[in-house]
Image (cartoon, rainbow, N blue to C red):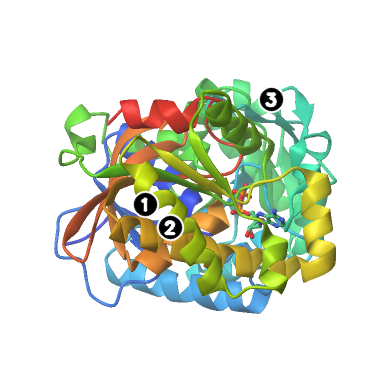
């Protein structure tokens, strides 16, 4: 058994988002949590290996990405896709640049592209500047992200700061002119010793125009948007049967550790509709153990699960996040809240939750790990970038949706369950 496309994603929700776009365009896709130990035993067109490497030290992110690469090549992958966030989440040290360059070196690739454009979710790139909806990245909520604040919208500059290779730009007029013009632009950049190109794209049509020009690249990097045109490079096209999941059951719950603007709105909307909510106060961690806090959450949730979906959240606005980080430390706050919410998710499933929404990329990673999930089948899309997924936890069925912070409409927390 041999796959066509091998994908490495730097976080869990990003992996799902990518798998979703590949499924919707006709690929049979499995998402693995971390690097699998065994070879594939089912027919697939693509495998997305979900790492949790976005916020690791660059050296560790590179090591893990190279291990994932080795696995995917051993499964026959003909092309490699490195997926990161459509808001280009990274710091001046990485990890997008270092991982891209390490994968290029391992694959012997002399050129690759980088585009986080994802028009369905309002991410567009023009003249190398990334827009989130109508705002520049640096003026969007991403400027206040707890771990990777993005304060420059110029992706050539952002990527160059993280890379040894020279970074160039393929501008919008070449994208409009089609695949041949895009290939010629790549050749011109290569001739001027630029090995990585940020690529402008504003609409899905742009992404479909770019894709054929990527056919022969050993490595493609970007957000999940650019993936919509890749299945056609392998002769595949959309077919609905690829997203069917088993029937859903059990209680419904939401765990949210995302502090992104979209999530904060979703929490507010769920509260306004009278939903049962439990706000976790991270500063309680200075006085109580994680286990004690998890026990309190589960004791609150148990009787309420019978009545409808419950929401447990640590989500908060930028001022509150800064206050928590000042007291606990940035990394320590992030990782201790993630472990807490992971244990909450595990406890909720033990109480009979069979339909679980998780908000936040890092938070989703922590929840999936706590639940011991190592593989998921990708199903129907809820909102752009977020499909329902299906996994088995100790032989019990679990439907789960892993939502990256800025994804989903304000009514996501209620709407998602009605889609199952
Ligand atoms: P997103 O997808 O929105 O970026 P993530 O889960 O990836 O969400 O990242 C959010 C980070 O913020 C996590 O590390 C999480 O533990 C941390 N966090 C959650 N709640 C708070 C809070 N109230 N204060 C500080 N940090 C928080």
- Where is residue 59 drawn, in percent x and y? 65, 78
In this view of the protein, can residue 288 be seen by the observer? yes
Q: Nearer the viewer, residue 15 or 416?
A: 416
Q: Answer above or below: position of 343 versus 202.
A: below
> Cβ–Cβ below 8 Å for labels 3 and 2?
no
Q: Nearer the viewer, residue 363 or 250?
A: 250
Q: Which residue is disc 3 drawn over?
A: 133
Q: Which residue is disc 2 drawn over?
A: 299
- Where is residue 265 drawn, in percent x and y? 63, 30
Instruction: Tell which circle, 3 or 2, labels the residue nearer the N-terminal end.
Output: 3
**Which image quadrant: the N terminus?**
bottom left
Q: CA distance from mark 3 to mark 2?
A: 40 Å
Q: CA distance from mark 1 to mark 3?
A: 39 Å
Q: Which residue is disc 1 drawn over?
A: 302
Q: Answer above or below: position of 212 versus 82.
A: above
Q: Residues within 10 Å of mark 1 (few under 14, many from 20)?
A: some
Q: CA distance from mark 1 to mark 2?
A: 6 Å
Instruction: Tell which circle, 1 or 3, labels the residue nearer the N-terminal end.
Output: 3
Determine whether the beta carbon of the residue marked 3 sits less than 8 angstroms from the nearest atom of ligand 1.
Answer: no
Q: Residues within 10 Å of mark 3 (few under 14, many from 20)?
A: few
> Cβ–Cβ below 8 Å for labels 1 and 2?
yes
Residue drawn at 79 percent across, 62 percent down? 325
- Where is residue 228 drawn, in percent x and y? 42, 34
């Amino acid at each position: 058994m041999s796959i066509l496309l091998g994908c490495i994603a730097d976080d869990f929700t990003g992996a799902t988002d990518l798998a979703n776009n590949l499924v919707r365009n006709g690929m049979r896709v499995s998402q693995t949590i971390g690097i699998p130990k065994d070879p594939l035993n089912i027919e697939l067109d693509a495998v997305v290996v979900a790492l949790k490497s976005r916020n690791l030290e660059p050296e560790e992110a590179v090591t893990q990405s190279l291990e994932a690469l080795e696995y995917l090549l051993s499964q026959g992958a003909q092309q490699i896709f490195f997926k990161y966030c459509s808001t280009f989440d990274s710091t001046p040290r990485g990890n997008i640049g270092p991982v891209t360059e390490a994968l290029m070196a391992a694959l012997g690739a002399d050129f690759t592209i980088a585009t986080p454009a994802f028009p369905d979710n309002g991410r567009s790139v023009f003249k190398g500047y990334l827009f989130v909806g109508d705002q520049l990245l640096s003026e969007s909520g991403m400027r206040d992200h707890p771990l990777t604040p993005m304060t420059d919208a110029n992706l050539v500059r952002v990527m160059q700061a993280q890379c040894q290779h020279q970074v160039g730009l393929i501008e919008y007029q070449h994208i409009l002119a089609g695949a041949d013009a895009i290939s010629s632009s790549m050749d011109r950049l290569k001739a001027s010793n630029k090995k990585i190109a940020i690529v402008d794209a504003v609409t899905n049509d742009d992404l479909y125009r770019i894709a054929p020009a990527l056919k022969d690249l050993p490595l493609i990097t970007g957000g999940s948007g650019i993936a919509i045109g890749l299945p056609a490079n392998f002769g595949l096209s959309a077919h609905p049967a690829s997203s069917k999941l088993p029937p859903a059951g059990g209680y419904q719950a939401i765990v949210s550790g995302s502090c992104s603007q979209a999530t904060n709105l979703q929490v507010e909307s769920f509260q306004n509709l009278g939903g049962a909510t439990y706000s976790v106060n991270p500063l309680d961690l200075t006085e109580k153990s994680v286990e004690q806090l998890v026990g309190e959450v589960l004791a609150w949730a148990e009787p309420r699960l019978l009545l409808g979906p419950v929401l447990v959240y640590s989500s908060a606005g930028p001022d509150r996040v800064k206050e928590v980080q000042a007291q606990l430390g940035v990394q320590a706050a992030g990782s201790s809240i993630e472990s807490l919410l992971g244990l909450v998710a595990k406890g909720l499933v033990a109480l009979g939750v069979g339909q679980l929404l998780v908000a936040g990329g890092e938070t989703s990673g922590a929840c999936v790990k706590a639940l011991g999930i190592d593989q998921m089948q990708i199903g129907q899309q809820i909102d752009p970038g977020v499909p329902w997924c299906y996994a088995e936890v100790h032989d019990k069925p679990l439907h789960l949706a892993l939502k990256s912070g800025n994804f989903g409409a304000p009514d996501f927390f209620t709407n998602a369950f009605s889609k199952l």
